[in-house]
Image (spheres, rainbow, N blue to C red):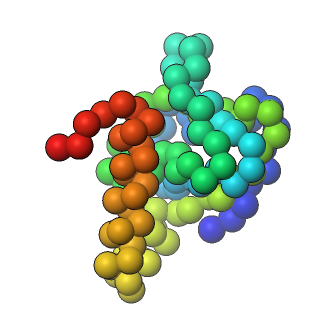
Amino acid sequence: MRLLTLSHGDVLIREGKALGHFYIVKKGSVVAIRAERGLLVYSRGDAVGIETALEKRPAPFTVVANGGCEALEIPVAKFDELQSQSPAELRVMAQHFLNMSDQLLGRKKK
């Protein structure tokens, strides 16, 4: 894991690219953009790209820094390693992130 410091407009995730990491916004905010329109704003504590990264799908939108911000970059491989060491706790955390993602995207639970 590593902490990224981003300036306004820096790209965190590029639409169509596979993700080997997901991100937790530590400070500031980032904006998900598709077709030059802002879709979602992620701020402190929000998980960005977790569902896409874990499901190994291409990113559905580009995510850029909205002003200066910091984000914790978490490799999917590290997440998988933690899952093998402490599956119950990680499952709870992952479900929490997915629920947050569903709420942000306005999706209903299946």
Would residue 26 be found to the left or right of residue 34 on screen?
A: right
Q: Relative to residue 35, is residue 100 depicted above or below?
A: below
Residue 12: x and y in percent read 64, 41
Q: Residue at x 32, y 51 (%)?
A: 55
Q: Residue at x 71, y 35 (%)?
A: 65
In the current view of this chain or complex, which residue is farthest to the left? 110
Judge whether residue 53 can be spotted in this image: no
Task: State the quadrant of the N terminus.
Answer: bottom right
Would residue 17 be found to the left or right of residue 56 on screen?
A: right
Nearer to the camera, 68 or 13: 68
Q: Relative to residue 27, is residue 78 depicted above or below?
A: below
| Quadrant hosting residue 57 | top left
Q: Relative to residue 40, is residue 2 depicted above or below?
A: below
Q: Residue at x 35, y 68 (%)?
A: 92
| Quadrant hosting residue 10 | top right
Would residue 41 be found to the left or right of residue 76 on screen?
A: right
Residue 79: x and y in percent read 45, 69
Nearer to the camera, 35 or 18: 35
Judge whether residue 8 can be spotted in this image: yes
| Quadrant hosting residue 68 | top right
Q: Residue at x 59, y 39 (%)?
A: 42
Q: How many marks?
A: 0
Residue 56: x and y in percent read 35, 49
In the current view of this chain or complex, which residue is farthest to the bottom? 85
Q: Relative to residue 45, is residue 69 depicted above or below?
A: above
Task: State the quadrant of the C terminus.
Answer: top left
Residue 90: x and y in percent read 39, 73
Would residue 15 be found to the left or right of residue 91 on screen?
A: right
